[in-house]
């Protein structure tokens, strides 16, 4: 059962964890699965607010990172470009959660009434086929989160928004948190196994993560790589050769520096399962970063777990 942050805040002096709110988001549920009652939950309005709120008073956060149907969470990768990540805050672990989306409306609203669908851009992207088939004429509007889309249905009508002609894509959990809503359809996501992977982040690299069950030692790391401005075009093979560790994913975002198409890369690396290694994983990652730097690739460890 998902507790609301205010309920938990009353009952212990556990550490705090920031999540994309309001209560009832998938981030909230994923956090509750791994931390249960061992943390106080603090709802933030956006993913950026989760990152930016991390401090010694609010040391943990959960961030959606990728989805098996809709791919990387762009907002998260844009934020991973910030200097504070890899300096003050770090990725400390991961958790996967299957996502079952529902189409939620105000009570008595019918499918044929719907002219607008609100949700987090990830959820809109994960339900494309359903939306095309069942509400092809509806406009789609991204919101900060799935639960904030549901909560907006309870707002009074305003210019361009009639809650009696609007639906939200979110978890059914929201109907028990916000009264006056009902589920019109459930299981509306494209693809059989719609799963989102979340990163657990912390302020400081060595504060103990309060898992309710410690996850198996995964030996993973996330490295941010930016080619030196003098080093010509990006050459993927040079980076792969330099890192010399198995790479499970490569993401790429504009670096926003003045040189056109000088992008920032995110390499997620891992240790081969069962590979007996005399060198501790932490040292393997730092040696890989050293090799990248020697190859003129400015590199920062964003997390080792
Ligand atoms: O908006 C939410 O509920 C989130 O936690 C982000 C998200 C959106 C869609 C799928 C997984 C996570």
Image (cartoon, helix red, strand yellow):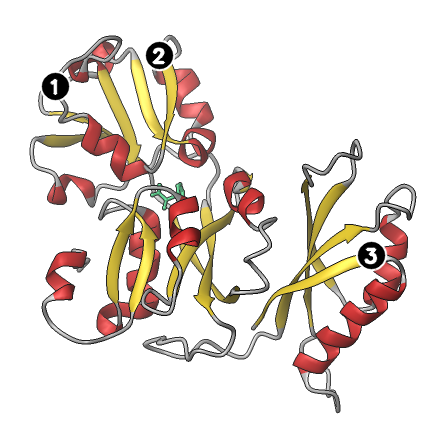
Mark 3 vs mark 2, CA separation in Å: 46 Å
Q: Foreground: 97 or 291?
A: 291
CB under 8 Å between callouts 3 and 2?
A: no
Q: Residue at x 15, y 39 (%)?
A: 175
Question: In the rendered structure, which disc, 1 or 3, sits on the residue that comes first in sequence?
Answer: 1
SS under mark 3: strand
Q: Residue furthest front?
A: 258
Which quarter of the image is occupied by the N terminus? bottom left
Q: Which residue is tagged 1?
A: 156
**Residue 2 percent coordinates (x, y):** 19, 58
Residue 7 picture location, percent across and down = 11, 61
Q: Quadrant of residue 145?
A: top left
Q: Is the shortest distance between ligand 1 and the CB of mark 3 under 8 Å?
A: no
Q: Secondary structure at mark 1?
A: loop
Viewer-nearest residue: 84 or 66: 84
> In the drawing, what numbered circle is on residue 297?
3
User: Left or right of 159: which side holds 217?
Assistant: right
Query: What whole-number distance in Å separates the C-alpha atoms at marks 1 and 2?
Result: 20 Å
Rendered image quadrant of residue 189: top left
Q: Quadrant of ligand 1?
A: top left
Q: Nearer the viewer, residue 53 or 283?
A: 53
Q: Earlier in the sequence, mark 1 or mark 2?
A: 2
- Tag 2 residue: 138
């Amino acid at each position: 059962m998902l507790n609301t942050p205010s309920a938990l805040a009353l009952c212990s002096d556990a550490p705090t964890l920031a999540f994309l709110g309001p209560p009832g988001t998938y981030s909230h549920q994923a956090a509750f699965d791994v931390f249960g009652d061992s943390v106080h939950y603090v709802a933030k309005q956006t993913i950026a607010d989760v990152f930016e709120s991390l401090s010694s008073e609010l040391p943990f956060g959960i961030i959606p990172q990728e989805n098996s149907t809709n791919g990387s969470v762009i907002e998260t990768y844009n934020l991973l470009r910030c200097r504070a990540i890899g300096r003050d805050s770090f990725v400390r672990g991961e958790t996967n959660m299957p996502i079952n989306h529902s189409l939620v409306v105000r009570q008595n609203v019918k499918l044929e009434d719907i002219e607008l669908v609100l949700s987090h851009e990830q959820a809109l992207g994960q339900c494309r086929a359903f939306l095309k088939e069942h509400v092809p004429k509806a406009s789609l509007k991204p919101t900060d989160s799935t639960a904030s889309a549901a909560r907006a249905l309870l707002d009074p009508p305003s210019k361009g928004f009639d809650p009696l002609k609007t639906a939200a894509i979110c978890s059914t959990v929201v109907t028990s948190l916000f009264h006056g809503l009902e589920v019109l359809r459930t299981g509306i996501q494209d693809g059989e196994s719609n799963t989102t992977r979340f990163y657990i982040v912390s302020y400081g690299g060595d504060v103990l993560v309060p898992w309710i069950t410690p996850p198996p030692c995964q030996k993973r790391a996330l490295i941010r790589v930016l080619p030196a401005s003098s080093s010509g075009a990006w050459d993927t093979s040079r980076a792969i050769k330099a890192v010399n560790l198995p790479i499970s994913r490569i993401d790429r975002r504009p670096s926003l520096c003045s040189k056109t198409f000088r992008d920032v890369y995110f390499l997620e690396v891992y240790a081969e399962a069962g590979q007996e290694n005399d060198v501790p994983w932490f040292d393997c990652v730092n040696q890989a970063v050293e090799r990248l730097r020697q190859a003129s690739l400015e590199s920062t460890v964003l997390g080792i777990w």
